[in-house]
């Protein structure tokens, strides 16, 4: 790979370049008002591309969150009574404002997450698509009339909003992970309290500013920021407060299990989108150029920090060497640098702990016999961020850590396989099942393998599987529930039956 222009980036200088400076908010948003924490405590947010300070936001604790929940609970009384058309109109205004302010939102996103600016612009459009989609879906929440087995009676079925939703989002998609959840909740008639990742709160707050301008009523959308130290108590409040009837979380499987356990005390509805370990299979009849091109995006988008990115690549032994050569040639074309450098196609990792995990997996893989073909180190740049080169490993066996551990970083192991039955059995050994990909031109194999993979989402001859119209979610220990699509709004609805005797 090569370095981008390697321009010296100064975080505060770039922050000042926003066209609309009011989108960069340093307070929490509760009950339609910008507020500090009750203690006045704050915490620092850094640019992962420079490790410089980007800004400070309120460090809210459980008592602050309780106040936000109370505001959401009060607002729910009125919001649930609005018509679907009213909710659709305000959501459409919000989506339009996001698109209008795409460049500023993308710049904020890049500064706090490190994502290359082109990817950040794409995420803003992706995030807006969920708000637009669920605004439209609000008008399509239908009930039923069920034939009664008893004469002189009727059975009606209706859907009603579940109540206040507590939403906890990760750092890798600071805008889209919020809108995919919040859009569905608000469209359903719920109100929300959002706790964004402490690494990336500024995108969430910018979205609140635009929601306020769009006319979303006070208390319907609330965003509380908290440090890593306060996160456990904030999470406990969201999962045990009886006024919250629904919790939606995207993050690791261990934390998802903890939140599920905590939520059981009040029997909350749960949507959990948890860890993955996605296989990417290249069969001997695959279009190797297409597979190599799609793997670049599927593995190295956002520096490998996506829950659905390819974590294990399996290539048929008859085309193994040819595929590796094609793929490595494309990896060499990646340009490593700060996300705001327009030439960058591969940015930093968001956290130092993530970087250390990649280095640890790499050491253990090499000790197990794997060979580094390209990458494998921290590059030398003019910016001192959490950078690690996109890395490809060959001579990989099932003993390497990626066989059973999610990497969440730019480490790509390439395994050999011999038969279809063998590779399907190997990829299904893991406890998680979020996404899987394979390339083949055999129509029979397409259906056999797609049905055999123990995952919630499958990409066939593509490395891209997510959109606002497609259900997103996993099986096994990758969670429960679905986001996006026509199914996503049902996660925030209760089904009520009404039996009428005439």
Image: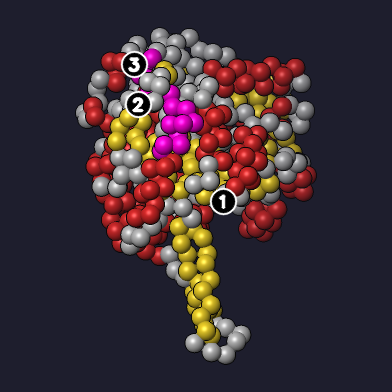
Residue 111 appears at what percent x and percent y? 37, 23
Q: Which residue is mark 3?
A: 11
Residue 360 % position (x, y): 66, 18
Q: Is residue 62 magenta?
A: yes
Residue 191 lies in the magenta-colored region: no
Query: Of all residues shown, which one is farthest toward the left?
Result: 19
Dividing the picture into quadrants, the one containing residue 451 is bottom right
Residue 420 visible to the viewer: yes
Residue pictured at 29% horizontal, 27% vertical: 24
Location of residue 28 with respect to 385 vertically, above or below: below
Q: Which residues are the magenta region?
A: 53-68
Label 3 sits on a secondary structure element that is: helix
- Give the left or right position of residue 149, taking residue 90 as reference: right
Question: Real-space Cα distance between discs 2 and 3?
Answer: 24 Å
In the rendered image, the vertical position of residue 264 relative to residue 402, given as above or below: below
Residue at (61, 85) in percent of width and height: 149
Residue for point 56% across, 26% down? 410
The mark found on residue 36 in the picture is 2
Q: Secondary structure at mark 2?
A: loop
Most foreground residue, 477 or 497: 497
Give residue 423's mark. Answer: none
Secondary structure, mark 1, is strand
Horizontal side of residue 407 vs 71, given as left or right: right
Which residue shows up at 38% across the image and 23% down it? 57
Left or right for 86, reference 413: left
Percent position (x, y) of residue 90?
28, 52
- Residue 269 is tagged as 1
How many tags in the picture? 3
- Mark 3 is surrounded, within 10 Å at the Cα level, by few (under 14), some (14 to 19) or many (20 or more) other residues, namely many
């Amino acid at each position: 790979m090569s370095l981008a222009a390697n321009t010296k980036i100064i975080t505060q200088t770039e922050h000042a370049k926003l066209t609309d400076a009011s989108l960069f908010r340093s307070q929490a948003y509760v009950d339609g008002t910008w507020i500090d924490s009750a203690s006045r405590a704050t915490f620092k947010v850094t640019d992962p591309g420079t490790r410089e300070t980007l800004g400070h936001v309120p460090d809210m604790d459980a008592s602050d969150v309780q106040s936000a929940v109370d505001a959401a609970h009060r607002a729910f009384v009125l919001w649930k009574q609005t018509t679907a058309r009213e909710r659709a109109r305000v959501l459409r205004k919000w989506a339009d404002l996001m698109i209008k302010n795409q460049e500023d939102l993308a710049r904020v996103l890049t500064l706090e997450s490190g994502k290359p600016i082109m990817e950040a612009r794409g995420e803003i459009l992706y995030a807006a698509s969920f708000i637009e989609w669920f605004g439209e879906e609000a008008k399509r929440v239908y009930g039923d009339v069920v034939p009664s087995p008893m004469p002189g009676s009727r059975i009606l079925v209706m859907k009603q909003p579940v109540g206040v939703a507590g939403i906890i989002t990760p750092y890798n998609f600071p805008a889209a992970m919020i809108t995919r959840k919040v859009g569905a909740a608000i469209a359903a008639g719920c109100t929300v309290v959002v706790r964004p990742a402490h690494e990336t709160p500024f995108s969430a707050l910018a979205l609140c500013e635009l929601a306020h301008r769009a006319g979303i009523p006070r208390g319907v959308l609330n965003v509380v920021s908290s440090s890593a130290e306060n996160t456990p108590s904030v999470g406990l409040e969201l999962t045990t407060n009886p006024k919250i009837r629904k919790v939606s979380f995207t993050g690791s499987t261990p934390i998802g299990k903890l939140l599920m356990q905590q939520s059981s005390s009040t029997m909350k509805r749960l949507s959990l989108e948890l860890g993955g370990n996605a296989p990417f299979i290249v069969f001997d009849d695959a279009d190797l150029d297409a597979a190599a091109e799609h793997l670049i995006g599927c593995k190295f988008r956002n520096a490998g920090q996506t829950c659905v990115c390819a974590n294990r690549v399996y290539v048929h032994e008859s085309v193994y060497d040819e595929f590796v050569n094609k793929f490595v040639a494309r990896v060499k074309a990646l340009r490593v640098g700060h996300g705001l450098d327009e030439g960058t196609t591969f940015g930093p990792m968001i956290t130092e702990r993530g970087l250390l995990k990649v280095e640890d997996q790499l050491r253990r893989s090499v000790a197990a016999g794997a060979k580094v073909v390209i990458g494998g180190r921290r590059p030398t740049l003019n910016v001192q961020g959490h950078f690690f080169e996109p890395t490809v490993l060959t001579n990989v066996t099932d003993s390497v850590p990626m066989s059973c551990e999610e990497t969440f970083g730019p480490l790509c192991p390439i395994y050999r396989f011999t038969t279809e039955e063998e590779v399907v059995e190997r990829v299904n050994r893991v406890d998680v099942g979020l996404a899987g990909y394979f390339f083949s031109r055999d129509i029979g194999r397409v259906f056999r393998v797609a049905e055999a993979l123990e995952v919630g989402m499958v990409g066939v001859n593509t490395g891209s599987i997510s959109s606002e119209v497609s259900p997103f979610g996993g099986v096994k220990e990758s969670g429960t529930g679905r986001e996006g699509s026509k199914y996503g709004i049902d996660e925030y609805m209760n089904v009520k039956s009404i039996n009428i005797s005439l």
